[in-house]
Amino acid sequence: MSTSKTDIARRVFNHTFKLDPIVRSLLDTDFYKLLMLQMIWGLYRDVDATFSLTNRTTKVRLADEVDIDELREQLDHARTLRFSKKEMIWLAGNSFYGTKQIFAPDFLAWLEGFQLPDYELSEKDGQFELHFHGKWVETTMWEIPALAIINELRSRAAMRGLGRFTLDVLYARAKARTWEKVERLKKLPDLKISDFGTRRRHSFLWQRWCVEALKEGLGDALTGTSNVLLAMDTDLEALGTNAHELPMVAAALAEGDDALRRAPYGVLKDWQGYYGGNLLIVLPDAFGTASFLDNAPDWVADWTGFRPDSAPAIEGGEKIIDWWRAHGRDPREKLLIFSDGLDTETIEKAYRHFDGRVRMAFGWGTNLTNDFAGVAPVPLPQLTPISLVIKVSRANGRPAVKLSDNPAKAVGDRGEIARYLRVFGDEEMAEQAVVV
Amino acid sequence: MSTSKTDIARRVFNHTFKLDPIVRSLLDTDFYKLLMLQMIWGLYRDVDATFSLTNRTTKVRLADEVDIDELREQLDHARTLRFSKKEMIWLAGNSFYGTKQIFAPDFLAWLEGFQLPDYELSEKDGQFELHFHGKWVETTMWEIPALAIINELRSRAAMRGLGRFTLDVLYARAKARTWEKVERLKKLPDLKISDFGTRRRHSFLWQRWCVEALKEGLGDALTGTSNVLLAMDTDLEALGTNAHELPMVAAALAEGDDALRRAPYGVLKDWQGYYGGNLLIVLPDAFGTASFLDNAPDWVADWTGFRPDSAPAIEGGEKIIDWWRAHGRDPREKLLIFSDGLDTETIEKAYRHFDGRVRMAFGWGTNLTNDFAGVAPVPLPQLTPISLVIKVSRANGRPAVKLSDNPAKAVGDRGEIARYLRVFGDEEMAEQAVVV
């Protein structure tokens, strides 16, 4: 019965295909990349920036799990992509954050010809050395697709050789697990949550399934997705503001310690020249939140909200609330966006803790789109996500540094880290395990 | 991307098809039906027997949930089926219970022309009146396909109108739940279990998935399936011995109370004229196990095992073990087959209780192939299985009766039930809720 229904053409296609591309559109990236890109293109067009891969889960020998030639094929395929006509029309015609034409025509005209630049890839001690050299305005666009590619190649390698039935159980259990989370989150009446899981997703198709699950199960509580392609295809809001690369490059370019100290506020000035409203979200932890708050000019308190990204949610949120109060602002009119290592339990906890005291939103990443630990009917530790990042490592030839509130998340040249710690201080930094 | 891959021909086929048949083969039935059929054909060829549907879950108005015209279409389709050449060759060539040519050539020659007889269907007070009148050798074959049809039509009706996503979550959760059961049962080192879930299955495809799950997860602990078609298609053993209809018809045909009392043993004599070894399984509860054991001739203790089918597993098993001992037989050489309302917990309990004291096998039915309570992302009580049976109700014009050890499972004419209770006694019968 079932044999006669097999689509022969599809089967033949399947067993002759050469490459199953992971990234098939330049929109398959995080929305904040496009927002930042417009500003970088406007203000930092000639800056060079190198982005580099770091596997913070050092015990996982990534280059032993993922074939370097397959990785090259996928990266090469991503380099063939251009924004399609449909995509350009959508970017120009769609409203983002309630704003029409958020992207200027001249920026879009430039974007139309965009192509991912070359990469430098080698293998060393079981890890990949992967660098993207070139203009910031080009290299920045590699972060998300390159991470998505490596993470999906790792999933594919982990599942290679599994039988049809084993895979069926695996995905059934992953779906059941995700749906349980949806049912728990449904119970939080004023929840605002969005998908931030592109970079560390199990796979593109799985991310799409998760986003559909949240849309179906949470309704309006799902405010959108950071993935621009999924936002377009599923009629959701594209969400995201800005990332650490802005203060990191600004700091690397700063001449002397005073300029370094002022750099994090300078990029906020840049930003508010481009965007307003709910896009005015401060990311305070690049060089430590305590120092950032201590030295912040009063106008920073006029911004809509903060996204504490490396301190524990409750502790980090409380400090920002205190700071708003100290600056005479009412936290109930302010927004906290939590996005660091969230899962159902931490979301519930933060929600209950802050409910009624501040506006809140959750950007749910890896534990949404890559929670596969233990779902396979056979032990498959390679399905457990790892803490893989692509960060700016140099700007105009100078080392770039990120400290964060969690020293385990610090990246950059050792000497420069020491200098930054001297300039910004290491007040209230506390090492915590980095899960993802 | 996904749109261009849609198989247009299949879509067009799907939206033009008239009927999606539930039963597509006469082998889609329980194996014991074929074993009994050979004996009925040999010894009771001219006996008339009416089979009738009873919904013991009276609170469910079945005829409100299932469309009577759809039911007719499915029953009519089943009547068009014949054993195919491949099926006949397999029945003749395969070994069952280690025996070659268990079916005699003259029986198979007759079977080749077999067709399900007509049915009588109407609706009354929200329930179906469904009767199969005719020769026992024909009507007996309706029990399993008719039940499977009604149960699957009920599932289909419950799920009608659910979206693609909701269905996806529903089946994902059902699969996850089944796999959890598999993982629990894996821990019982000497478990012998088989699928007995054809009649009350959620659907044919779901039963097939469950059998594949057990095969993959339990390996040799899965001894087979009662479903002949699945046994053939998945290279498993076809399992099953005999059912209540044998003593019920024998009792109905008995002239006078003495003959009635002897009837249950008479059919065992009939049976051992046809089969041996592991097919010598006593089903003791048709008119109460206590009476059956009290009056059983000693040769019944030579049979391989018992299948207590309506007493609680542990209590029922202990009584049979005592009886074997009282008759000087070693229970460790005997076999108990449990098949009444089993689920993981009751299986584990009985396994642990009897382990090492008697050989055991489990025939897992409804809770294997139709455990859908609560799996839908929306409340869907119509997916919870009901206790639906098709039993012989008359033989040669006389009422047929079943008492069982659980008065809630008694079926038949009230006056006759009273007479049977007088003849067999109501010793140790205890009413228990009938779940499925």
Image (spheres, coloured by chain):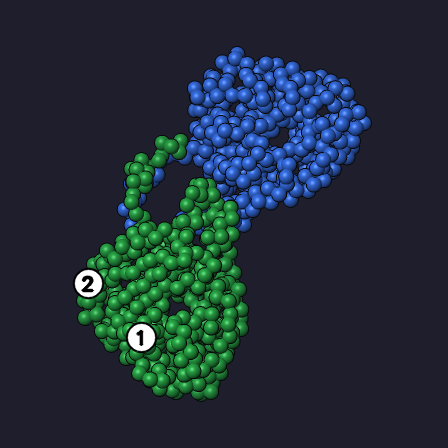
Chain colours: A green, B blue
Locate residue A57, reporting x and y percent: 46, 61
Locate residue A92, reporting x and y percent: 23, 66
Name the chain under label 2: A
Residue bearing the label numbered 2? A113
The amino acid on which the numbered mark 1 sits, given as a three-letter code, is: Arg
Q: In which quarter of the view is residue A150 placed?
A: bottom left
CB atoms of marks 2 and 1 within 8 Å: no
Name the chain under label 1: A
Residue at 43% across, 32% down: B21
| Residues beneath discs 2 and 1 located on the same chain | yes
Residue nearest the viewer, comparing A302 with B331: B331
The disc at residue B53 is none
Q: Residues within 10 Å of mark 1 (few under 14, many from 20)?
A: some
Question: Image check: B11 left or right of A125?
Answer: left
The amino acid on which the numbered mark 2 sits, given as a three-letter code, is: Gly
Residue A286 visible to the viewer: no
Residue at 39% across, 55% down: A63
Locate residue A235, reporting x and y percent: 33, 60
Q: Is A355 rendered above or below residue A425? A: above
Question: Image check: B302 left or right of B339?
Answer: right
Residue at 54% across, 21% down: B95
Residue nearest the viewer, comparing A413 with A162: A413
Q: In which quarter of the view is residue A333 placed?
A: bottom left
Residue B217 visible to the viewer: yes
Q: Is B50 rendered above or below residue B355? A: above
Residue bearing the label numbered 1? A398
